[in-house]
Image (cartoon, rainbow, N blue to C red):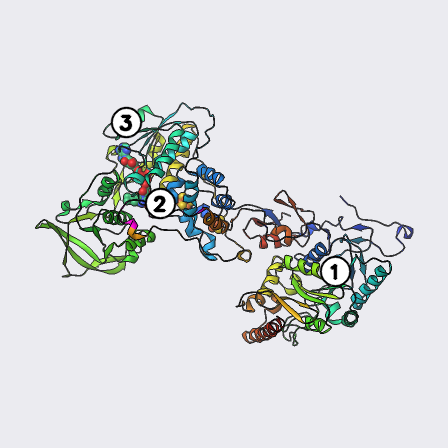
Amino acid sequence: MKNFTLPSEELMGSGHLGCQGCGGALAMRYALKAAGDNTIVVIPACCWTIIAGPFPYTSLKVPVLHTAFETAAVAASGVRAALDIQGNTETTVLAWAGDGGTFDIGLQSLSGAAERNENIIYICYDNEAYMNTGIQRSGATPYLAWTTTTPEKTPKAEPKKDIMAIMIAHRIPYAATATIAHPDDFIRKVQKAKSIYGTKFLHVLAPCPPGWKAPSEWAVKLSRLAVQTRVFPLYEVEDGERYILNEPKEDRALPVSEYLKLQGRFSHLTEKDIQAIQDLIDKRWQRLMRQVRESS
Amino acid sequence: MKKPIVFTSEREMPPMAVSLADMGHNRTGSWRYLRPVYREKIAPCKNACPVGNDIPRILSLVSEGRYEDAWRLFRETSPLPGVCGRVCYHPCESFCNRKNFDEALSIASLERFVADACFDLEDRIPERPKRSEKIAIVGSGPAGLTCAYFLAKDGYAVTVFEAASQPGGMLRLGIPPYRLPREVLDREIELIARWGVEFRTNTKIGQDISIEKLWEQHDAVFIATGAHRGRALNIPGEELAIQGLEFLKAVNVGKTIALGKQVLIIGGGNTAMDCARTALRLGAQPVVVYRRTRDEMPAIAEEIEEAEHEGVQFEFLAAPVALRRLNGKLEVQCIRMQLGEPDASGRRRPVPIPGSDFIMRADAVLKAVGEEPELSFLSEHVETSEGIVIERAHGILERAGIFIGGDAQTGPSTVAQAMRSGKETAQAIKSFLRGERKPKPKKLEEALRVNFSYFVHQPRVPMPHMPVAERITNFSETKRAISSERARAEAQRCFSCGVCNSCDNCWVFCPDAAITRIDGTYEVNYDFCKGCGVCAEECPRNVISLVEEEL
Ligand SMILES: Cc1cc2nc3c(=O)[nH]c(=O)nc-3n(C[C@H](O)[C@H](O)[C@H](O)COP(=O)(O)OP(=O)(O)OC[C@H]3O[C@@H](n4cnc5c(N)ncnc54)[C@H](O)[C@@H]3O)c2cc1C
Ligand code: SF4
Ligand code: SF4
């Protein structure tokens, strides 16, 4: 009895440099299984710059273009243009960037590509901080989380930037969230993105065990809990207006504390802090439910 | 093994930064301090089953509709699946991991289903070397039958001596046919006989043949004579009451018993419940008189519920103090009780309320206040305490080749416990005959960590019952069989604890692509596995263990 129907082709090889339980590595493995071998991956500065391996090696069985931090979307646009000139519309161009390169440093080039509706898939694997440089806060770091630049005494005071809302505001043909705990959903979304012309954006929650101060074996469990607690609902938005909810389907969510208590980066939280986070999540969930209702 | 690329001069380098090889040279396995290993564990249901039925594997076969294979797997551990599926108190279900998720698997009804579906099948009896050793088994209850089955399978010459006219022990003499139809029992005994077991019925050891004689003529003797002597009430007029078990035996062997309308049953155990329900079927209005309350009744809950359901009345907190005959009726003088301090069994002790005597009238009184072994035929050889063989003597007997088991050793217990004892004795006899020490039972790790995320709630399949009005007029089976569709659906609820069922989760969730699938099994590539432990955590059924790497 299979729980998932994953394509068997393995386009990410072993021996890569991801940490134990790296959510970003698992995300790449699924993304490539879905995208297939006729794919070019564009990677700006991010954990995957390291994970893929140093010169002259690569752990991916598809071509990779490593580029500067702020250029994932624009470099991918260039690769796309070059392929189009060659008459190659078959090859998928996949920009693969972390949260730093998406929420912060690469945002303007991503916005530009989205505004031009470049025919690329852009996947942000979000581990919620600048992890490989030493866990510094990013625009994706959640409210009240610890990072090395937001220490426990003064944890991050700002809520996580709503990157999905930003991308949806560009009215791109397809935007979706995914996690590594739901591989079938993840793969379906990448395949759907492949079938659509224009800029497709996937926001993938990719737990980082060292950065989240959690045991490596919980990488998938944390992703699952993020969905079950509505911290990270799985949904899709077509053409910037049609909202489809995938998970969680239950009427009642687990309390956010179930998710927070497993992670050292939240161990300093007080009851009041947790309630404040819960309120944020409830508000966002209600907004999402409204959007889903209004578009159905 | 892939080697790292070493450039010895600038000229060997490519003109631009382009990769030339994959990361296969980078043995990330050296990062690992915990090693995932596929280590199947014993499911708690199987561990709790006294006969060790391989429940997860059996249920997986049932879920695929492979009933014959399931039946054959049952028969590897038990000769009585049809019996157990009906009357075993299923400790397996009490330990089922699924009860922490929604409801335990309905294991016993599936066992019954499999046995019924395969009613006409025969064991495949292989050619096997005949052994010269002869073994005598005294008593043909579940202990004797099980011991005989496992010895005969190994080629030993087994003779079962039974005082009654037909084999089966309490299964035939005590348990009424509305819970265990006799065709089922007959069929399973017949299959045991096919292995070459000889049954000598109407032969009482200690009367027809002495134990000494039996011992002389055989290489080993197993005494599995059960616990059949009814305990006394020790009150005046006691002789006016009938022993409940004797009543059941009489009815069960087809004698006609006229009890009259009003029947009182003294006691709160399983024998009392069966007496009441049997009396009901003979047209009586039974009332169970018990000295504590319903909560303390030793009968198992399901039996009490069934009795209540069928219309048996209960008089709680009452104990008889004297019996008299008056104008053709029986008069039972009772005293009201109240619950005091807990006794050794943890149940609250009943204490009489002075001056609270009252009279209950009846046509017949059945006493069912417990049974004990009757081992007078052994009296020269064993020491007993309250009818139970004490351990010291037990050891001495074993060294001489005489084994005691089942209810005869423990006092009244259960069918499955008696079977366990029979099975263990078969093993002990084999060791004894080979002059070996008894093998120590292996302690297995239980599969207790189920990842509930991979299962959806689904209620347990209900057991269909015959309507009460149809039940109480006859002795046909009260529980109906479940349909094939329902059986499969129920079996699909099984988590398959501790047993890999090729769900792929480990392969799916490895962030290092270090797990390969080979024909439904999996292999970890330790050259690359970093030991993150995600596979073990996401295995739904606790098959993967993380063990520390040796330095
Ligand atoms: C009314 C009743 C209902 C029960 N219902 C259940 C139930 O639903 N589920 C459950 O798990 N357990 C039940 N039990 C308990 C269960 O039946 C016993 O624990 C089990 O049968 C014991 O098995 P045994 O093989 O040790 O002995 P028995 O089944 O008692 O068999 C002993 C056999 O030895 C024979 N014998 C005795 N002395 C001699 C002799 N000297 N020579 C030759 N043969 C002799 C007897 O005739 C008998 O056939 C019930 C018991 C009773 C009394
Ligand atoms: S013998 Fe009893 S405990 Fe074992 S599987 Fe059967 S019903 Fe369960
Ligand atoms: S779920 Fe299945 S294997 Fe697990 S304890 Fe229950 S019956 Fe046994």
Q: Report the amino acid beneath label 1.
A: Trp
Quadrant in which the C terminus of chain A is drawn: bottom right
On the image, the x and y values in percent for residue B413 come to 32, 44
**Residue beneath the point at 70% across and 56% down:** A34
Whether discs 2 and 3 lie on one chain: the answer is: yes
Left-right relation of A56 to B130: right
Is B32 or B534 nearer to us in this picture?
Answer: B534
- For ligand 2, the image quadrant comes to top left
Kindly identify which residue carries mark 3: B212
Q: Is mark 1 within 8 Å of ligand 3?
A: no
Kindly identify which residue carries mark 2: B87
* Mark 3 Cα-neighbour bin, 10 Å: few <14, some 14–19, many ≥20: few
Q: CA distance from mark 2 to mark 3?
A: 35 Å
Q: CA distance from mark 1 to mark 3?
A: 83 Å
Whether discs 1 and 2 lie on one chain: the answer is: no
**Disc 1 vs disc 2: which is toward the camera?**
2
Q: Report the amino acid beneath label 3.
A: Glu
Whether discs 1 and 3 lie on one chain: the answer is: no
Q: Is residue B48 magenta?
A: no
Which comes before the other along the chain, label 2 or label 3?
A: 2
* Mark 2 Cα-neighbour bin, 10 Å: few <14, some 14–19, many ≥20: some
- Disc 2 element: helix
Q: Report the amino acid beneath label 2.
A: Val
On the image, the x and y values in percent for residue A113 come to 79, 69
Q: Is residue A43 above or below residue B212?
A: below
Q: Which mark is residue A48?
A: 1
Task: Say whether marks 1 and 2 touch (CB < 8 Å).
Answer: no
- Residue range of the region highlighted in magenta in the rendering: B470-483
Q: CA distance from mark 1 to mark 2?
A: 62 Å
Q: Is mark 2 within 8 Å of ligand 1?
A: yes
